[in-house]
Image: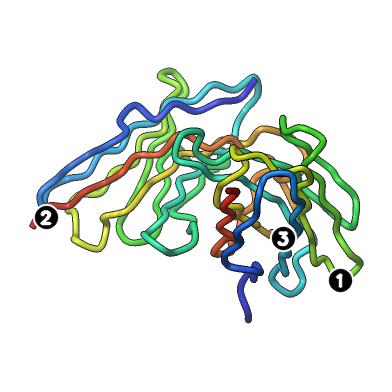
Amino acid sequence: AQSVTQLDSHVSVSEGTPVLLRCNYSSSYSPSLFWYVQHPNKGLQLLLKYTSAATLVKGINGFEAEFKKSETSFHLTKPSAHMSDAAEYFCVVTASNTGNQFYFGTGTSLTVIP
Amino acid sequence: KAGVTQTPRYLIKTRGQQVTLSCSPISGHRSVSWYQQTPGQGLQFLFEYFSETQRNKGNFPGRFSGRQFSNSRSEMNVSTLELGDSALYLCASSGQGAANEKLFFGSGTQLSVL
């Protein structure tokens, strides 16, 4: 069975400092993994995705994530936080080999302190 | 290109009533999936339609149903509403509905059951 666990429900960082949002996954086959972001009163937007092409994945707005099979992790990082990064972040794993069915993590709320 | 459009934006219903939500995917997209988002449960997959056929289904009771039309527009119906059905219902579309494909989300329909 496929699942994801986001290890922190809330993360606070100061503007200009690094961001680390942690995600562990469980999958019975080689998974596709994603990070989505949800800004207040806005729709969900894809940040980046891993589909086995490369273990280090670069996304939009300076975010990147590294797929580590040995640790079953897919942590999201950014070198320097910006005020506009404040949002809810979701780690997502494919639930099926066929079609769009995904398991979403419970989300991590990122606060950026000026 | 217009994004995913969901109507209505807000709905207020009472227990026992039924409700129909509508989703128009991005032009050319053939896969439409539905998610329920609540503060306690996060995002949970309801079902996915591709070429007018339900291809994947989540663990929701039979009161939740959907359909897709030949123009890929989709509707979701909830019958005999319960208080616990209060949630943000999100629709997402993708081109071919592949397991590693990016989802484009609508802004959602906020359903309140009184």
Q: Where residue B5 is drawn, which disc sits there? A: none
Residue A100 placement (x, y as % from top left): 71, 45
Q: In which quarter of the image is residue B81?
A: top right
At 44% from the left and 33% from the top, the residue drawn is A67
Residue B76 pos. (x, y %):
76, 54
Q: How far apart are marks 1 and 2 (CA)?
A: 46 Å
In the depicted view, which residue is nearer to us: B10 or A87? B10
Label 2 crowd (10 A; few <14 / some 14-19 / many >=20): some
Q: In the visual, does A66 lie left or right of B103?
A: left
With B76 as the anchor, is A18 left or right in this view? left
Indicate the chain on which mark 2 is placed. A
Amino acid type assigned to the residue bearing label 3 in the image: Leu
Q: Mark 1 lies on which chain?
A: B
Q: How far apart are marks 3 and 2 (CA)?
A: 40 Å
Residue type at mark 1: give it: Asn
- Point 61% across, 25% down: residue: A2
Q: Which residue is drawn at 49% across and 25% down?
A: A25
As drawn, A106 above or below B71? above
Q: Nearer the viewer, mark 1 or mark 2?
A: 1
Question: Which type of secondary structure does the marked residue at label 1 adopt?
Answer: loop
> Where's the C terminus of chain A, which quadrant?
bottom left
Q: Residue A15 carries which label?
A: 2
Which residue is the site of mark 3?
Answer: B21
Is B58 on the left or on the right of B102, as rendered? right
Q: To which residue does mark 1 refer?
A: B71
- B4 w.r.t. A30: above or below: below
- Residue B1, position as x, y percentages in the image: 63, 81
- Label 3 with label 1: CB-CB less than 8 Å: no
Q: Nearer the viewer, mark 3 or mark 1?
A: 3
Q: What residue type is labelled 2?
A: Glu
Q: In which quarter of the image is the N terminus of chain A?
A: top right
